[in-house]
Image: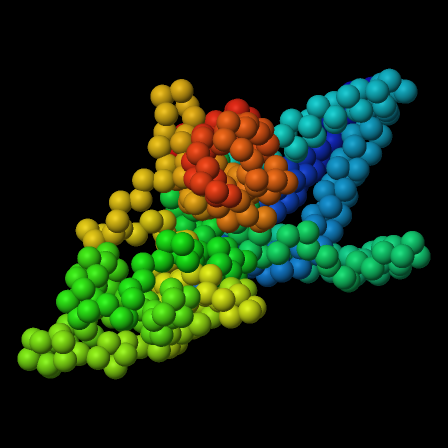
Amino acid sequence: MHGAHADGVTLNLWIAAGIVIFCIFMAAFFNGSETALTAASRARMHALEKGGDRNALRVNHLLAKRDRLIGAILLGNTLVSIGSSAFLTSVLEAIFGYRGVIYATGLMTLLLLVFAEILPKTLAINYPDRFSLTVAPAIGFFVAIFGPILAAIETLIQGLLKLVGIDTKVHHALLSGHEELKSTVDLMHREGGVQRTERDMFGGLLDLRELTVEDAMVHRTKMYTIDADLTPHEFLHAVVGSPYSRVPIWRGEPDNIIGVLHAKDLLRAIEDSGGDISHVKIEDVALDAWYVPNTTSLQDQLQAFLKRKIHFALVVDEYGVVLGLVTLEDILEEIVGDIADEHDPVALGVRQNPDGSVTVEGSVPIRDLNRVLGWQLPDEEATTIAGLVIHEARAIPEVGQVFTFHNFRFEVLRKIRNRLTTLRVTPLGGPQAPSPS
């Protein structure tokens, strides 16, 4: 009888060990699946699904009902964890008495922590896409099996939350889709997966709907215009001397724009007149100016340029006063950065000094400075670096004045009337310092 009892105890231990190992395996499966599915790339799964991958389709279906997915995994994990602990405790208690409870608690804590938590989650977080594709069919089976139980639990939870005034059916996103995309690309850049130029191009594309033409326009003080009342040869000389193919022309005063002249149209008119420019009427050659409000978003203006097949527009304020001009190239530069050709004037604007400071012309746009140097100066309240200093100082500074804000030091070097023409900007380190990449 004593031998039979020992054999029975040994058999119970082997059964307990087998059940515990199975439960630990299932707990590891559920924990790893939860980590992998929540970390899986939605974009990659979408691409694989379009390519005909059935497991990717299952992953997308599971992620589409994330609440039901998490509920099924938690339910399965809870069942196997509590079940294995309870079974092992009962067996060890029968063998060792009350000390079996202590042994079971310590042993199950160690086993579950190492083999059911840390190990599978580490594996899943390093290979989330591959792990997700592998476990998707099995997890889908458990979601279907636990469906009725989960539906009842969800109804109960929603009822309890409604009692305290929380409606789980209304989702309030903290970030818009555009903000989430920008944040994701910025994070990938910091982790080394995306280069700065690629991040800037993607961010510039998303920013088009938030920026207006006033943010990208050439200010009226920098517009190249030609007086229509010049003599024919003086006018031709001015057109040839222009670095641009399209030039606004005015009469009487510079604000009185009467049209926009394309150099190719002028050449064609001179050829039609037998090479004699004195017979060419500038008004007949020039195109009507296209005026757009300064509040037009760059995205809308880009669509308008493409629709009208015109690449040049004058920007006006609410009173009809010309503020500047915007071209298709200006908008594209917001995406890809500066586009220069052999006829573009050399824009100095920014000069880096040996001491780490940067000498900047006051008219340099903040966005261009951020893009070139990797800075993160705010551009919501001002377009140019001089405008930012005036906004922060709440006054027009004098030469020699120094200001510190946004983790930078700004010194006014030159000033013409009320315009800050040259500043020295010095990064002070910290989160706003220029990035090396």
Q: Quadrant of residue 217?
A: bottom left
Residue 110's place in the image compared with 26, above or below, is: above
Residue 210 visible in the picture:
yes
Residue 30 spot, x, y in % from top left: 65, 43
Q: Quadrant of the C terminus?
A: top left
Q: Residue at x 40, y 62 (%)?
A: 326
Q: Is residue 392 left or right of residue 349?
A: right
Q: Quadrant of the N terminus?
A: top right
Q: Is residue 4 left or right of residue 359?
A: right
Q: Residue at x 17, y 70 (%)?
A: 232
Viewer-proximal residue among 336 and 18: 336
Viewer-proximal residue among 258 and 278: 278
Q: Residue lying furthest left in this view?
A: 274
Residue 59 visible in the picture:
no
Residue 53 spot, x, y in % from top left: 45, 59
Q: Is residue 242 left or right of residue 322?
A: left
Residue 108 spot, x, y in % from top left: 74, 27
Q: Is residue 83 left or right of residue 40?
A: right
Residue 126 spot, x, y in % from top left: 51, 36
Viewer-proximal residue among 436 and 289: 289
Q: Residue at x 28, y 70 (%)?
A: 228
Colour approach in the figure: rainbow
Q: Residue at x 29, y 66 (%)?
A: 227
- How many numbered marks, from 0 up? 0
